[in-house]
Amino acid sequence: MSSKQVLVMKKFQSLRHGKYCAQASHASVGALLSLGEVVGDNFVIPLTDPFVKDWITGSFAKITLQVDTDQELIDIYVAAQDAGLPTALIKDVGRTEFGGVPTLTAVGIGPADPVLINKITGSLKLF
């Protein structure tokens, strides 16, 4: 079995590499955490989906792709939600970049079945 997570990054004319890394990390963690829930004092991610279990106990495979616009990020996020995939849409609050303006930066999808993710992201370019 093969499982993966896809991080879709919005391209910016001028953005520090560290900021891109942080936003990709937010997307990755956000999508994974979307699978869980707080149970008492614990946070639990069920491993009933074999693709989630494979990813968590395996190599954390990730692919990073790119888009140019907010609308593309939103469309990808909605398509992933509609497909029932774990997903997170990341909006930077603007403290260190973007002049204090909250700005969409990334979408995380998965871990999930690569076939389902590819239906949404298969036409995008590598970041």
Image (cartoon, grey):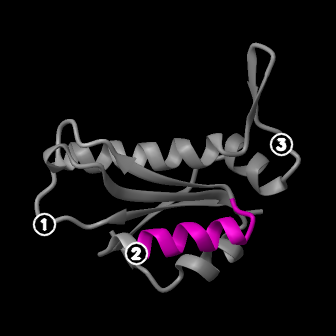
Q: Residue furthest right?
A: 48
Q: Is residue 96 above or below residue 117?
A: above
Q: Identity of the amino acid at label 1?
A: Gln
Q: Which residue is mark 3?
A: 47
**What is the span of residues highlighted in magenta in the rendered image?**
72-85
Quadrant that contains the N terminus? bottom right
Q: Which image quadrant for residue 13?
A: bottom left
Residue under the point 22% across and 49% down:
101
Majority secondary structure in the magenta region: helix
Q: Which secondary structure, mark 1?
A: loop
Q: What residue did someone put label 1 on?
A: 13
Quarter of the figure with the C terminus:
bottom left
Q: Residue 115's spot in the image, x, y percent?
A: 70, 76
Number of the front mark, 3 or 2: 2
- Which of the numbered marks, if any, corresponds to residue 101? none
Residue carrying label 2: 71
Q: Residue at x 69, y 42 (%)?
A: 56
Pointers 2 and 1 in contact (C-beta within 8 Å): no
Q: Is residue 115 left or right of residue 105?
A: right
Q: Residue furthest front?
A: 101
Does the magenta portion include 78?
Answer: yes
